[in-house]
Amino acid sequence: QGLRGRHVAYTKLNSHSSRSHTICMLKVSKDHEEEGVVRNCTAVMTIVDLCGSERVKKSDVEGTRLKEAININQSLSALKTVIEALANAHP
């Protein structure tokens, strides 16, 4: 079910180039009793699969694939900016 939104396409550099980002969150929760008190333990694991940036000239893409490559590179650049801002806000 989670792979329905995943897109891949052929480029000169990669025959199965990922054209989308994927975020999967797995939440596990368990209730247990300790000294007559019911406690809940919850853990969340987040897995992130980012499509890779591409050198447009080397991947030899055009049309729709070119637009995708530009959008992929812009989104990765925006993510970098957010991560840097978060890192700088919390020393």
Image (cartoon, rainbow, N blue to C red):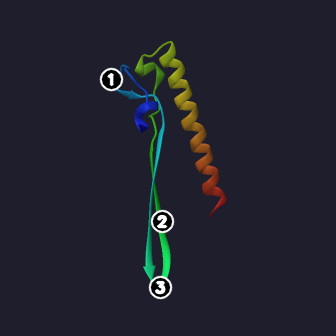
Q: Three-letter amino acid code at disc 3?
A: Gly
Is 30 in front, or is 45?
30
> Which residue carries the number 1 mark?
15
Measured in 3D between alpha carbons, the distance from the residue under mark 2 to the one under mark 1, in whole angstroms, is 40 Å
Badge nearest the viewer, 2 or 1: 2
> Which residue carries the number 3 mark?
36
Label 2: state its secondary structure. Answer: strand
Residue depicted at 44% across the width and 79% down the height? 33
Q: Three-letter amino acid code at disc 2?
A: Thr
Measured in 3D between alpha carbons, the distance from the residue under mark 2 to the one under mark 3, in whole angstroms, is 19 Å
Query: Mark 2 or mark 1, which has the lower sequence index?
Result: 1
Is 3 in front, or is 60?
3
> Which residue carries the number 2 mark?
42
Please say if 33 is above or below 16: below
Please say if 64 is above or below 81: above
Q: Quadrant of residue 77?
A: top right
Q: Where's residue 52, x and y in %?
A: 44, 34
Q: Quadrant of the C terminus?
A: bottom right
Q: Where's residue 70, x and y in %?
A: 55, 25
Badge nearest the viewer, 2 or 3: 3
Is 78 in front, or is 6?
6
User: Mark 3 packing: few (<14 Cα in 10 Å), some, or many (20+)?
Assistant: few
